[in-house]
Image (cartoon, rainbow, N blue to C red):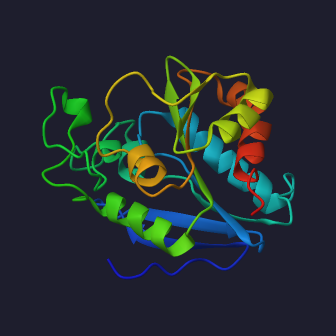
Amino acid sequence: MAKLELPAPEKTVTIGKSIQGLDIQLYCSGNGPISALLIGGVHGDEPEGYLFAERFMQEVQTGSLTLPEHLKLYICPRLNPDGCAVDRRTNARNVDLNRNLPTGDWTADFTNPRYFPGLSAGSEIESEITVAMIEAIKPRMIMSLHSYEHAMINYNGDCLDLAEAMARSNGLPPKSDIGYPTPGSLGTYAGWERNIPTITLEILRGQLPDDAYTQHRMAALDGLSFYRS
């Protein structure tokens, strides 16, 4: 796809359309020298993630949450709007977007349809948008919001210190391995292959939105603003 046009501070722009024509939006706040990227809704059946991202974005927009001066924060609250609309993990082409990124370990092999990686690496528009966001924003760190029965701060790249800082706020264990292979994932693409500290915040599956937000609000802010250079 063409080079992404980023939003100006305190603005939201549509950076692409899903297979079913829904907007994929990106919001920007702050004008500091350090950029961070927050992504929600990669898996549409994990509302804990995208509801948190939307509430966090709303608090930033209204001024209820103040960002530090060094930070420029980009938020894509629903990367997979088609999946979010129908509570489905995959996109409208039944592809697991967290197995579709063009990583060195991408494979067409899969055993569970939930993890269908697509017919080729980076085949999905949402994956193209993810790559374009990273290239345009050049984030100092990335945080992707998911949910899992075993809540954790999954970190990829040389960023244990970042994960530990978040853990002091939300009490979750930092782990570099989620416990099973994830070829084609954001953590591999950005964290391990491009040396961009990448956090996959696995919120407890089924946790009530208010409880999840209370637990992770400061941890998310601490993580997104962790780097100052």
Q: Answer with the quarter of the image where residue 10 lies.
A: bottom right
Q: Give the left or right position of residue 3, taking residue 57 as reference.
A: left
Residue 126 or residue 201, whichever sits in front: 201
Residue 157 or residue 67, whichever sits in front: 157
In percent of the image, x 56 and y 71: which residue is there? 137
131 up-or-down from 115: above or below: below
55 up-or-down from 179: above or below: below
In percent of the image, x 61 and y 43: which residue is there? 159
31 up-or-down from 125: above or below: below
The location of residue 194, given as percent across then percent down, is 45, 58
The location of residue 95, given as percent across then percent down, is 24, 45
Q: How many marks?
A: 0
Q: Give the left or right position of residue 117, taking residue 64 as reference.
A: left
The location of residue 115, given as percent across then percent down, is 25, 34
Residue 97 or residue 87, whichever sits in front: 97
Asked if residue 183 can be seen in this view, the reply is: yes
In percent of the image, x 19 and y 31: which residue is there? 113
Q: Give the left or right position of residue 186, taking residue 222 as reference.
A: left
Residue positioned most to the top: 149
Image quarter where the C terminus lies is: bottom right
